[in-house]
Amino acid sequence: MKHAILPALISYIALFYIVHLEALKMELQGLPRREPLPWQRAVISTLMTVSGVIILSAVVYWGFGWMKGAFGEAAFVVVGALMLAAYVAIVRFGAKYPELHMEKPGEKMAYLPEIGPTLKSGLHFLLPVAALIWNLMVEQLSPALSAFWATLFLMFILVTQRPLFAFFRGHGALGEATKHGFHDLFSGLVTGARNMIGIAIATATAGVIVGTVTLTGIGLAMTELVEVLSGGNLMVMLVLVAVICLVLGMGLPTTANYIVVSTLMAPVIVELGAQSGLLVPLIAVHLFVFYFGLMADVTPPVGLASYAAAGIAKSEPMRTGLTAFGYSARTAILPFMFIFNTQILLIGITDTFHLVMTIVSATVASMMFAAATQGFFIAKTRLHETLILLLVTFTLFRPGFWMDMVYPPYDEVAPTELTRLVEAAPRNGNLRVWVEGMNLEGQDIAKGVLLPLGEPGNARERLGKMGLTVMTLGDQVQVAAVRFGSPAEKLGLEQGFAIASIELPAAERPDKEWMYLPAFALIALVWAMQKPRQ
């Protein structure tokens, strides 16, 4: 969760920014309020909404959870009766307020609906959420079965809310209101069935591809194919792995897709990165695979999430998928940054100021990439402005790339310093070590590894906990033994390997974060160029 939180946040911030840019391009304006809403009230309203969901969950779990033990199997019936009584009481309370705009879909809205009356007249729609929480947390039913009962309750509300409102408001015509409720239910079911036709066909077609991959063993051959096609180039391999994730993700659930591809490809990426001098933490590779598995949900020609969005927007599914894929480019760039700049995963953060700089720079980078791909910043971007924004994005995401051209990032240390460096390393620190030797298959190996050192202690203890034993022979250090199933074995270390060198961060090198200054200066330049055209 710690490693995944920042990429998730900046991805959503960039998505909101894309919506903002689209609104600017199309000159969309929001509906005016009858009364102005100060920002203080807006913040309080947002906090109250979030707090309300938390309080509702707490009330259901602790306020009614004791009923499960008191009534046993009959608790489901008792809670159902209480929910029914609460539903009638809430509808009676909501009937005191005027009818919602959504009950008159033909009427044109001139003002944004007021928050208070809208919320109070629709409180009964929270009850299916309470039913869902009860089934998940107290009854401990499966997610699918919990959603089934919550959906049934929602269908019941859809049929009965109009007659109840008509009764409590004294409008009469209960028969007409009941007929209208059943019509709402029938219309919803028909629309849902129609929207599912395209999704069912796309899923069935994707199932053929996924079935071929998972049942024929071609997945293992894909690993060898990627190694051959990449020719040892890490960037090419990452692109090929991303394509494989997208193909498998068309029909596999995200979790299954992640398991299949990470099992096959994660060790290969780590190994190739180690041979090219890029020591990639395993969590970065796994998140890379996971993100592109998620991207499959919006990637044509399947893109199940795009089909669902097309059903809501009443738009053409394939065009919606292409648009969604373009919007998701902001997400596609993040996994590559996981590999080349692990600070985005909060790895290697030294202090609070460093954390703030990482969060701000990554967020701004994602927003500038969105502006470049959408062709709009504060005005429509020209080609040279788009190129500048892309350069800013790259610099903010990977500032070390430019600094490495001027100052080498690491100093080499003799392997005989291993014992001293292991003992001096901080808790849960890593040590960059280059090893050479011949593996059990007779292949010459020369690669780098990150030794995870765990808790402080002497060198023998810290290396022993990761399953590694070394011996010093003059000015050489060799791997004497590797425990089976240990972290050292998973790093690809074998008995007889020689430690060629140890790399430490360069002492004379300026912080790579200095590259943020020219990047922000370029943003100001683009803003100044576009301001007259705004």
Image (cartoon, rainbow, N blue to C red):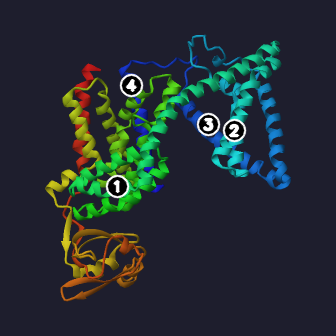
Q: Residue at x 57, y 11 (%)?
A: 108
User: Label 1: which residue?
Assistant: 343
Task: Answer with mark 1 or mark 2, whichever residue precedes in sequence.
Answer: 2
Q: Nearer the viewer, mark 4 or mark 2?
A: 2
As drawn, is 173 to the left or to the right of 346?
A: right
Q: Which mark is residue 49?
A: 3
Q: Residues within 10 Å of mark 1 (few under 14, many from 20)?
A: many
Q: Nearer the viewer, mark 4 or mark 3?
A: 4
Task: Answer with mark 4 or mark 1, whichever residue precedes in sequence.
Answer: 4
How far apart in space, not on screen, are marks 4 and 2 (Cα)?
A: 35 Å
x, y percent for residue 481? 33, 84
Q: Amino acid at mark 1?
A: Gln
Task: Answer with mark 4 or mark 2, whichever residue precedes in sequence.
Answer: 4
Extreme residue in the left direction: 406
How far apart in space, not on screen, are marks 1 and 2 (Cα)?
A: 41 Å
Q: Nearer the viewer, residue 443 or 185?
A: 443
How far apart in space, not on screen, are marks 3 and 1 (Cα)?
A: 33 Å
How far apart in space, not on screen, are marks 4 and 3 (Cα)?
A: 27 Å
How far apart in space, not on screen, are marks 3 and 2 (Cα)?
A: 21 Å
Q: Which mark is residue 150?
A: 2
Residue 3 visible at all: no
Q: Amino acid at mark 3?
A: Thr
SS under mark 4: helix
Task: Answer with mark 3 or mark 1, whichever residue precedes in sequence.
Answer: 3
The relative height of residue 386 versus residue 365 in the rendered view (above or below) is above
x, y percent for residue 489? 36, 74
Q: Residues within 10 Å of mark 3 (few under 14, many from 20)?
A: few
Mark 3 and mark 1 residues within 8 Å of each other at the beta carbon:
no
As drawn, is 190 to the left or to the right of 519?
A: right
Mark 4 and mark 2 residues within 8 Å of each other at the beta carbon:
no
Q: Amino acid at mark 2?
A: Ala
